[in-house]
């Protein structure tokens, strides 16, 4: 036995490398399927493919928007990471899913190395890491692109803990600077990172064991972290107020709030050990909780807390893990309620680290000294990780696209207003307007005051040309949500379709008078007005959008099109549009037309040749280029292009007339 022990000691480095490899492999296996997954029609549109800033990739105006936008709180680092991906890979859901998985794997490795470094227990560290890595509660954070913020903020939190561990060994005044910087970066990914100072105090308690004699000093040295936490919390509150997203204390009574908090803690604990019935949305019971559930939850939490404090000398790791779980959940446990959900799987990403440590080290303490304790523990750990991995693979598979996720949600939680709304929005996204109406109307029936459901039903009715029904719904909705710019925009759209132009413009103006007035609404209203011939009013909409976001291609292009009757005015926005997207054929073609109308035929020919390279058989481009070449005196090339235009479109009368004129001109 001694020789075997010496063998393992001599080759410890190799086994550690093998452990790292095994952890990576085990983490990737249940999640690798995400490479083929699609976007989810819930938050993904506003975070990625319907967001004009993200769609453009990394740009100067996009960076400024990411740093200043308060939509969905202040999340600049999350937004910048998504923009960088679009620049590298385009709008590719598979690539974005794999980047989420990459950050999750990094977090798993950081957690493992942090535990090894602090405790020296390789086996227990590996087991705790694997329990965290493949738990089904990780699915939402890893396979939902909009939840990039979870894996990203955890990445910086774990780096901050590593930096703090390093700083603990030093005595310089600036030793905490790296951890403070990483704290700021974590909060720029997700405001839930604000609990880092509490995590550091718990880390001092265990595994560092610094609470023995100098606990007051530990609080003093955390003052910079607590001060920064207060500052960052202030930024979060300001951003929520700016986006009209501040949680309210008036939605529930204090009694209902506390009852639901206790029950939520107990449900999170139950899901940790028995992860069944997982869903992307858990509807808030509000005041409809049951007293028996509250008593059961209170009893469970009290017993675990009593055990943790009772065993704190023999098992400080258990108290550490339990307090970590309770305290890091505080920001999202429901003291402030601003949505219809009572809890979310993604909220457990950081809290579960403590729970996995508590369970693993307590099992090690209770069993390792028993006969055959180590083999039994190893077998139980293997079975647990295998079972969790299998369950995670099955649950992750439900996230492959919106339809499968909604079907799973209906099977687990029944029909609720959120899964019906998501299904309806998915139908809208794929152009199935008739099919979208039914689930959206169900959603509205289940939650009559939900503004998103009201807007979505109205949008479908507009597309189906059922304007009177849409108008009636929106007139009712605007009484409840008088400061919702999107409802005013939809009202303007309906009135425009009904040819009530002045009323439509009034509602568009109201939509843009609220803060923040979304730029995309200005753009969409301009498109609607231009389609109805109100080009001057449309141009003002585009100009207002550009005043805020001057480097968005779509705004510049639409302004150029609205000003087409005034080529001198249309030139600058079209030049900007081509600069922003040099290969966009529509922008190149319309810029060429403007140059022709301004009699700058050489530039027109240059731009139109670029467009023709992209679409070599487009009759409109061929005609416009032929006109420029004819004006430049290149009669043979002009005739060639006109003949090709007529081959592609034989009834193209202007091309036929210009060809006849070109042939009459003496060579």
Image (tube, rainbow, N blue to C red):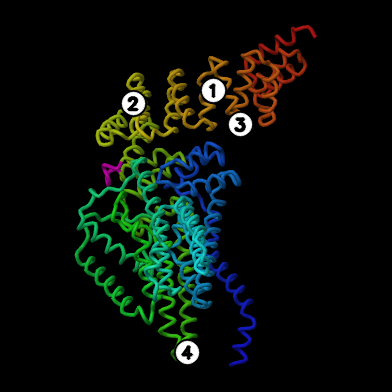
User: What residue would you read off at disc 2?
Assistant: 507
Q: Position of residue 20 (x, y in %)?
A: 58, 70
Q: Position of residue 185 (x, y in %)?
A: 49, 53
Relative to residue 484, is residue 367 drawn left or right?
right
| Residue 420 covered by magenta stretch | no
User: What residue would you read off at disc 4?
Assistant: 372
Quadrant in the rendering for residue 462: top left
CA distance separating discs 1 and 3: 14 Å
Relative to residue 536, is residue 447 drawn left or right?
left
Nearest to N terminus: mark 2 or mark 3 = 2
CA distance separating discs 2 and 3: 33 Å
**Which one is nearer the viewer's eye here, 250 or 454?**
250
Please give the label number shown on residue 640: none
Write down the region rendered in magenta.
444-450
Mark 4 residue element: loop
Mark 3 residue element: loop
Nearest to N terminus: mark 3 or mark 4 = 4
């Amino acid at each position: 036995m001694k020789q075997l022990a010496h063998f393992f000691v001599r080759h410890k480095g190799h086994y550690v490398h093998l452990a790292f490899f095994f952890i990576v492999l085990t983490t990737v296996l249940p999640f690798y399927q995400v490479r083929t997954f699609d976007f989810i029609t819930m938050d993904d549109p506003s975070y990625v493919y319907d967001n004009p800033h993200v769609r453009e990739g990394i740009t100067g105006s996009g960076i400024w928007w990411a740093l200043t936008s308060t939509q969905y709180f202040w999340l600049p680092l999350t937004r910048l990471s998504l923009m960088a991906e679009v620049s590298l890979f385009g709008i590719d859901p598979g690539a974005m899913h794999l980047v989420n998985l990459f950050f999750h794997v990094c977090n798993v490795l950081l957690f493992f190395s942090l535990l090894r470094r602090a405790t020296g227990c390789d086996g227990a560290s590996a087991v705790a890491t694997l329990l965290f890595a493949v738990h089904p509660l990780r699915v939402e954070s890893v396979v939902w692109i909009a939840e990039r913020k979870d894996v990203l903020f955890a990445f910086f939190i774990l780096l901050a803990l590593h930096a703090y561990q390093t700083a603990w060994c030093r005595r310089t005044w600036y030793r905490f600077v790296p951890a403070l910087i990483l704290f700021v970066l974590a909060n720029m990914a997700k405001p839930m990172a604000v609990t880092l100072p509490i995590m550091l105090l718990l880390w001092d308690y265990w595994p560092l064991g610094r609470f023995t004699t100098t606990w007051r000093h530990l609080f003093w040295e955390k003052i910079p972290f607590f001060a920064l936490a207060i500052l960052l919390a202030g930024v979060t509150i300001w951003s929520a107020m700016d986006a009209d997203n501040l949680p309210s204390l008036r939605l529930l009574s204090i009694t209902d709030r506390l009852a639901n908090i206790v029950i939520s803690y107990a449900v999170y604990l139950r899901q940790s050990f028995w992860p069944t019935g997982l869903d992307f949305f858990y509807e808030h019971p509000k005041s409809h909780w049951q007293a028996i559930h509250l008593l059961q939850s209170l009893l469970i939490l009290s017993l675990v807390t009593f055990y943790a404090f009772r065993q704190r000398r023999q098992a400080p790791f258990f108290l550490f893990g339990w307090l970590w779980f309770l305290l890091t959940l505080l920001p999202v446990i429901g003291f402030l309620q601003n949505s219809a959900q009572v809890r979310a799987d993604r909220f457990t990403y950081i809290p579960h680290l403590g729970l996995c440590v508590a369970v693993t080290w307590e099992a090690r303490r209770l069993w390792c000294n028993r006969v055959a304790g180590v083999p039994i523990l190893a077998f139980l750990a293997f079975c647990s990780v295998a079972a969790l991995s299998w369950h995670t693979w099955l649950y992750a598979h439900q996230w492959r696209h919106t339809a499968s996720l909604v079907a799973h949600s209906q099977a687990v939680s029944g029909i609720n207003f959120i899964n019906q709304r998501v299904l309806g929005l998915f139908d809208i996204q794929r152009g199935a307007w008739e099919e979208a109406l039914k689930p959206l109307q169900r959603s509205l029936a289940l939650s009559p005051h939900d503004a998103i459901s009201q807007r979505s039903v109205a949008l479908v009715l507009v597309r189906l040309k059922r304007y009177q029904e849409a108008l009636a719904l929106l007139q009712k909705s605007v009484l409840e949500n008088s400061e919702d710019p999107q409802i005013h925009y939809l009202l303007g759209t309906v009135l425009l379709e009904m040819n009530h132009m002045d009323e439509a413009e009034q509602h568009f103006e109201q939509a843009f008078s609220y803060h923040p007035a979304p730029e995309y609404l200005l753009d969409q209203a301009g498109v609607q007005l231009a389609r109805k011939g109100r080009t001057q009013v449309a141009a003002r909409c585009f100009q207002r959008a550009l005043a805020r976001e001057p480097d968005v291609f779509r705004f510049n292009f639409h302004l150029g099109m609205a000003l087409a009757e005034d080529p001198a005015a249309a030139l600058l926005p079209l030049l900007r549009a081509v600069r922003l997207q040099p290969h966009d054929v529509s922008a190149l073609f319309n810029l060429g037309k403007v140059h022709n109308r301004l009699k700058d035929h050489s530039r027109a020919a240059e731009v139109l040749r670029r467009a023709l390279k992209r679409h070599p058989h487009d009759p409109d481009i061929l005609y416009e280029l032929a006109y420029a070449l004819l004006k430049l005196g290149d009669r043979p090339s002009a005739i060639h292009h006109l003949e090709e235009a007529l081959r592609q479109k034989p009834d193209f009368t202007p091309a036929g007339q210009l060809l006849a004129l070109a042939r009459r001109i003496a060579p």
